[in-house]
Image: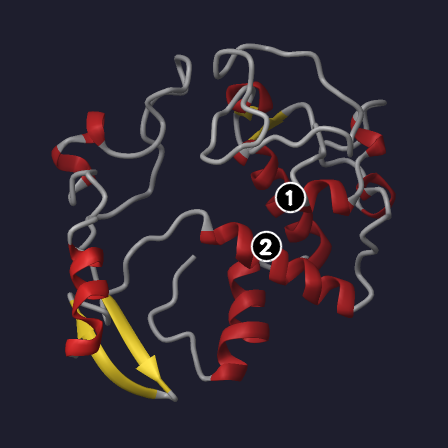
Amino acid sequence: MDNFAEAIAFSQSHEIPWPRDPAADPAHWGVHHDDPPPFNRLRGPVHPRGGVSGVILVRGKEVAAWGEPDRADQTFSVAKTYLAILAGIAHSRGLLNPSERVSERIPGIGFDSPHNRKITWEHLLTQTSEWQGECFGMPDQVEHYRRVSYDPKPPSGKKGDLRPLNEPGTYWEYNDVRINQLSLALLHLFRKPLPEVFLESVLEPIGGGRDFRW
């Protein structure tokens, strides 16, 4: 434990400043505050979280732990990793080709306009699709000009302002609405709830899946 004391102390001193209970202070919980109205509000479901937790394994043996590592807590952008893995599984099953246009495989779910017809699976997976539309009631515009850390080309406008779209594959933008559209496309591709596919194809084969929810 002493060998990792500094790392553990660093973890414990860098807890996210959001309230642990979303219901207790919803105005200061989440990453939605910079969104333009009416999208600058919490969208659930969410639940209270625990404090900072962690486990350190060395050669498969647990050598340190802190917090509540067995607690099931929410994670967010890890969903992009899940989707990338699921896309890889779909590719291994012959369900998608990265260079194939999405509209050729699954028409009728938002890839049929002249602009969106050009979008490939690779564009969706690399956040260069420039997909335009609404997904689950959210327009892609709400994420226009979104700022992210270490972006080599910071956006030049205000988040949520409409900007001219570029050709699919030529412009990178961190856009969670388009990530949701990728989720929808994969759902139609597998024709099965994505959490079930992930559980059966990824977690259970490696002995995981206990208390898993997505």
Image coloring type: secondary structure
**Quadrant assignment, res 141:** top right
**Vertical position of residue 92 compared to residue 100: above or below:** below
Q: Earlier in the sequence, mark 1 or mark 2?
A: 2
Q: In which quarter of the image is the N terminus?
A: bottom left
**Quadrant assignment, res 213:** bottom left
Residue closer to the observer: 1 or 181: 1
Q: Quadrant of the C terminus?
A: bottom left
Q: Name the residue under label 1.
A: 182
Q: Do the residues labelled 1 and 2 touch (CB within 8 Å)?
A: yes
Disc 1 crowd, CA 10 A, few/some/many (<14, 14-19, 20+): many
* 50 on left or right of 34: left
| Residue 72, horizontal then vertical, whole percent | 28, 63
| Residue 76, horizontal then vertical, whole percent | 40, 48
Q: Name the residue under label 2.
A: 83
What residue is drawn where x is 34% and y is 84%? 58
Secondary structure under tag 2 reads: helix
